[in-house]
Image (cartoon, rainbow, N blue to C red):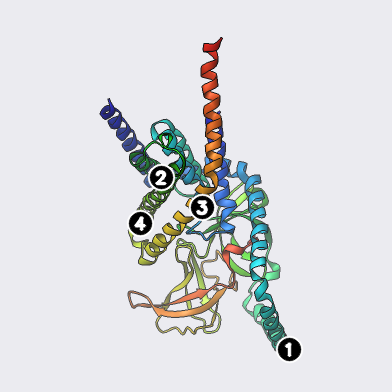
Amino acid sequence: MDQKFLNKKAVKFIVISAVCLLLVFWNPKEFFNPIRKFFLSAAYPLQKTFYLTSRTLSASVEFLGSISELKNENEKLIKENNSMLAEISKLKEAWRENELLREQLDIIPKSAFNLEAGLVIGQSPQWSGSWLIMDKGLSDGIEVGMPAIVSNGILVGKVSETWSNGSKIALLSDSESAVNVMDIETGAKGILRGEYGLGIVMDMVSQNELLNVGDSISTSGLGGDIPSGLLVGKIKEIKISDDKLFQQAIIASPVKYSKLDIVFAIKN
Amino acid sequence: MRIIFFVVSILLFAVLQISFLPNFFSANSSPELVLVAIILMTGIYGIEKIWRMIILAGFFMDIFSFLPIGVNILSFIVTAFVISLLEKRLLDLRGTWKFLIAAFLIVIGTIVNGMVSYTTMTIFDSLNKTGEETTVVFISGIFEKSGYNLLFFALIYWPFEKMKEYMDTGKKLSVVMPANK
């Protein structure tokens, strides 16, 4: 009897596994997406509550842990503040020149973006994929493809899915992310790709283009889906691609994706 | 009542995994609350009694993780099957031995679950996206994750035992009472 029961169990296991594999590789999104959106909409109040609570707790824990570093950090900040005062007058001149160039190049200034602010209420828990959930969705005018930035114009990702009261933002570090970018200092152009949620790389840069460590990288506007001039990060390291045809630059984002509280979707 | 309790717990654990834990743990090592619950339930009740619940739990995790439907269902079913082959029924054990064997099953289950979902997603993403870095991240993440899963298991073990005793007592009373009448 035990043997018969084992066979039945094994058969059931094989059948279920086969159905699962079929579902995974067939991936009928059109069938499951409405179901997913229903559950996400229903879970929204819980998600928001849990996320905000955990952010508060996490911030408290971090604060307690950082008390010993506060004195050193304070001294460092005072020094930085003093040196920044000297740069303000230089920046005023740069601002005047920037406005003149925007007029000439017809680039939309960041203040002219139609932004929809949203709270972050969830994050990707697994190594595959890198995304956030925002608490604004279709009912707030959010559409798939809209860029997502943080308040000072730094691009963090793009809206990849949206439902009535929420949206999923695929971060730049997602392995499926690809954004046209350029080196602000040298004009070198490339494609920014994500690396399995771990970091971002500027790829497909021609060998005869110049890249320098420390250069700032922004969106180039090519393709038309993301406006130009959105900061992405700075070059941390430069290397040659595996096929030796292109240069690659590892980019350090000024933003820590896991610590985002509020993101803005650009609606225009 | 057990079914309702299980479904509500799984939904709650799934939402906690997505919305509460990421602020305390990195993406690769966040504890898998649903997986720990599945392994515990399999060890105590056996896969033949709860396979439908396992499928439902996998379905909820696929929904909330934005993974293709079937990835977590498959990894949970395979994990539960492996656990059911390995375990002595935890009902037969008492005290420290029961706890230690359950802890061992949690570690094995975490590794099996990770391997199955990693393999499925690697094939799904197509082979040329898989690189050495991903494998290294996956391997280091699995051991960290096992540790955190063990920690969560230690936290829920005693309340889970008490809840199970309460439910089993209620079941025994309902069986005994008709005979007393």
In the picture, which quadrant includes the N terminus of chain A? top left
User: Dot 1: what SS?
Assistant: helix
Q: Are marks 1 and 3 in contact (CB under 8 Å)?
A: no
What is the crowding at mark 4: few (fewer than 14 residues within 10 Å), some, or many (at least 20)? Answer: few
How far across and how far down the image is residue A225, in percent? 55, 63
Residue at 49% x, 50% y is: B32
Whichever of callouts 3 and 4 sits on the residue coming sooner in the sequence is 4
What is the crowding at mark 3: few (fewer than 14 residues within 10 Å), some, or many (at least 20)? Answer: some
Q: Which residue is mark 2?
A: B101
Q: Between marks 4 and 1, how big is the CA–CA gap?
A: 53 Å
In the picture, which quadrant includes the C terminus of chain A? bottom right
Q: Which residue is mark 1?
A: A89
Q: Amino acid at mark 1?
A: Ser
Examine the rendering and report whether any part of residue A268 can be seen.
no
Observer-nearest of B5 and A228: B5
Q: Amino acid at mark 3?
A: Leu
Q: Between marks 2 and 3, how big is the CA–CA gap?
A: 15 Å
In this image, B92 relative to B24: left or right? left
Q: Chain of mark 1?
A: A
Q: Are marks 2 and 3 in contact (CB under 8 Å)?
A: no
Classify A170 as above or below A138.
below
How far across and how far down the image is residue A260, in percent? 62, 63
Q: Which residue is mark 3?
A: B151
Q: Are marks 3 and 4 in contact (CB under 8 Å)?
A: no
Q: Are the residues flagged by discs 1 and 2 from a single subunit? A: no
The circle on residue A109 is none
Q: Amino acid at mark 2?
A: Ile
